[in-house]
Amino acid sequence: MAEAVVKLANDLKETANNDENWRRKHFQELIKQWHPDKNLEQTKMSNAVFQYLMEMRAEYLTVGGAASSSTSRYPWQNPNQGYEHDWEQVDVEHDWNQD
């Protein structure tokens, strides 16, 4: 699961310089992809990833071109920074072989 969030964080970082309309459409696609109602087989993972997306929403949609700067400290550069979800506990509780 943490891998999904890291991959998502990298995607947000890589696409942060795209224009605002593009970012809004892309973010909407991510929301649809990870919405818990669309992932009933992976409820815990989709809830955690969706929660992460909602926490990153404002920063991603308003960032403009600043996220690519090497001095930038946007949250998606470190998906665990400021994000209080216990990934290890979720990994322990979830049987990944059933997904």
Image: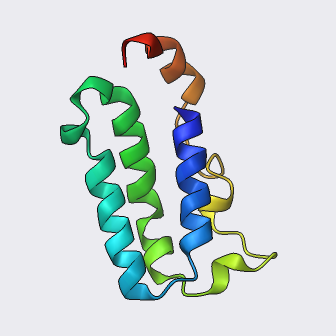
Q: Quadrant of residue 55?
A: bottom left
- Direction from residue 81 to residue 64 in the image, left or right: left
- Pick out the residue farthest to the left: 37
Residue at 37 percent of width and 12 percent of height? 98
Quadrant where the image shows the C terminus: top left
Q: Position of residue 79 (x, y in %)?
A: 61, 50
Q: Residue at x 41, y 66 (%)?
A: 57
Residue 10 falls in which quadrant of the image? bottom right
Q: Residue at x 38, y 57 (%)?
A: 54
Q: Residue furthest right?
A: 70
**Which colour style is shown?**
rainbow
* Rendered view: 92 above or below 48: above
Q: Is residue 64 above or below residue 99?
A: below
The percent position of residue 22, horizontal first and vertical second, equals 39, 81
Whether residue 82 is visible: yes
Lateral position of residue 45 relative to residue 13, left or right:
left
Q: Pinpoint residue 84: horizontal percent, then vertical percent.
A: 55, 41
Residue 27 as seen in the image, left or right of residue 76: left
Q: Position of residue 49 (x, y in %)?
A: 42, 43
Residue 83 visible in rendering: no
The number of discs equals 0
